[in-house]
Amino acid sequence: MAGTIDQLLLAGLKSRHLALRHLAVAGKVIVIDEVHAYDTYMSVYLDRVLAWLGAYRVPVIVLSATSPAARRRQLLEAYAGPDGAPAGSDLTEGSYPPLSAVAPGGIPVVRRPPASARHTAVRLERLEDGPEVLAGRLQTELAGGGCVLVVRNTVKRVLETARVLRSAFGEDAVTVAHSCFVDVDRAAKVRDLLERFGPPDKATRRPEGRHIVVASQVAEQSLDVDFDLLVSDLCSVDLLLQRMGRLHRHQRGEDQSERPARLQAARCLVTGADWAADVPVPVRGSVAVYGAYALLRAAAVLMPYLEAGGGRPVRLPADISPLVQSAYGQEQAGPKAWVPALDAARERFDRHQSDQAERAAVFRLGAVARAGRPLFGWVAAGVGDADDTRAGRAQVRDSRESLEVVVVQRRGDDTFITLPWLEPDRQGRRCGGLELLPRDFHVRARIVGAKYGTQQSVIDDVVDRLLMPVVLLHRHDRACAQQAIGAADDADQAVRALGDLATDLARAAGFEGEQRRSAARELGFTALEDPYRTWLAALTDEEQAFEERRRWQREVHAVISRLGAA
């Protein structure tokens, strides 16, 4: 059974029916992939879940190609529990890849099996930021053809870069992949990338000429694609190494001889920063995603590889562990002139991590108690229900609550259809190009009336189940909506006149008038409510909207006249 990490993390959240979640994982083997991608907030829950899984003696396999030693130590100690021995220094020493294991209450064991036969030496080079600069450089690099992967840190930069590259190389020479496509299009993008840039024995449509893929982080992991050249925004070291895994990933001829001559040596151009400044200045979007500290530490440990004139190459996989440990270690990195900027960024980074940990701990499940202790109160002061909704998943992620939407296309006549390119469903039923909301389609609206004071507002009235045609909601054709609003004003003016008449008659008879005014207004609005609902539901033709308004005015006049005469 496969699922998202949220399903497992919810086992560490104080919530109703938590025992059922724990029962669901008991007796299973849990496999957690790409654990380096989880932030501090999620890691707080993951560590607590591992402690409970260790207490249940549930086998857990945690996978990561670039996890720092400090994080591996935390994971091992969480699973081992309070009776386990602390992990030793062998987590940081030795060759790559490390294989770490621990039993509940046991001592961590580290083994380092031989690395795979695939070795790659990647040359790094700094590249000035800017899509025009990149376009000029790729004109040179792709003179003899080749496939390039450009990884940007934000979707905005993906789109900006793609626009410039398409202008320079043509629409057909540039492919875009990012996380903001609708789900069916994202799946199609992945299939297309694998068919064109996957392993040699599986990729059936690899471009023969030059081609550029501009992608966000969707291309950096869990995707078996192979490119001749890599261009990447500056990011944290572990993620840059993940991106390098898409470069010369497969053997194409002896010594990569089947690749274009200029691209037979693996190279990565690192951009997304002002390299000319005394301290590199990452672009704003990258700082928002990764934080300044991770980016500056990455730049610092990569300096020997980025030296002008050709620094030493990054040897994969041998350099993975040293680079990751240096980037996430406590030792000084980079020139002394960088120290003030690094210290300031580290202070902000530490505050952010502490804030995440404190907020995550509020509803985190308590620690595993000794055997025999009752579970009374173990979910006290919890979040209540935690289900598989977006709200439920948001409780174990430090992110804004997302909103699932159905994407539709607006046509020229202001009607809406499903996306025309959607394929039929499994039963062969048509899904694309379906008209969703014809002009005479009716929706039931809830209308809320509020009274506003100087300090607060009070909900004064709620009208449920008001049936109205969807044409009233159209932005570009406002005729029906304007007449519907005007009709409500017509009713209000008529009822106001009825109230004035009742007031005058009451005063003429020697009675207090305001009370009679209120009663008359209430009577008038009650009498007009059903006729207005009926009239509104029939208001679907904008060409007849003005005439329908005249008909409504006549009906209002008749209703109010009868009340006045009575």
Image: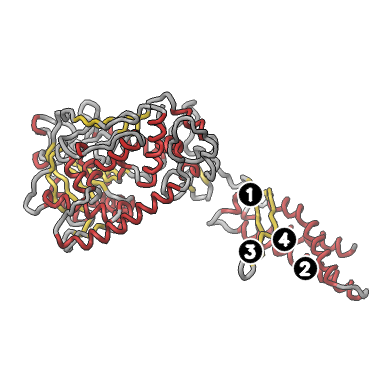
- Is residue 210 visible from the viewing direction of this image? yes
Residue placed at 69% from the left, 50% from the top?
464
The three-letter amino acid code for the residue at tag 3 is Ser
Given contact means CB atoms under 8 Å apart, are the residues at marks 1 and 4 in contact?
A: no
How far across and down, in percent of the image, does residue 324 sit? 21, 44
Q: Which residue is outermost to the top?
A: 27
Given contact means CB atoms under 8 Å apart, are the residues at marks 2 and 3 in contact?
A: no
Quadrant of residue 255 within the rendered picture = top left
Residue 457, label in figure = 3
Q: What colouring does the structure picture have?
A: secondary structure
Q: Nearer the viewer, residue 33 or 106?
A: 106
Secondary structure under tag 2 reads helix
Residue carrying label 2: 496
Q: Earlier in the sequence, mark 3 or mark 1?
A: 3
Crowding at label 2, few (<14), some or many (≥20) Cα neighbours within 10 Å? some
The Cα atoms of the two marked residues, 2 and 3, are separated by: 25 Å
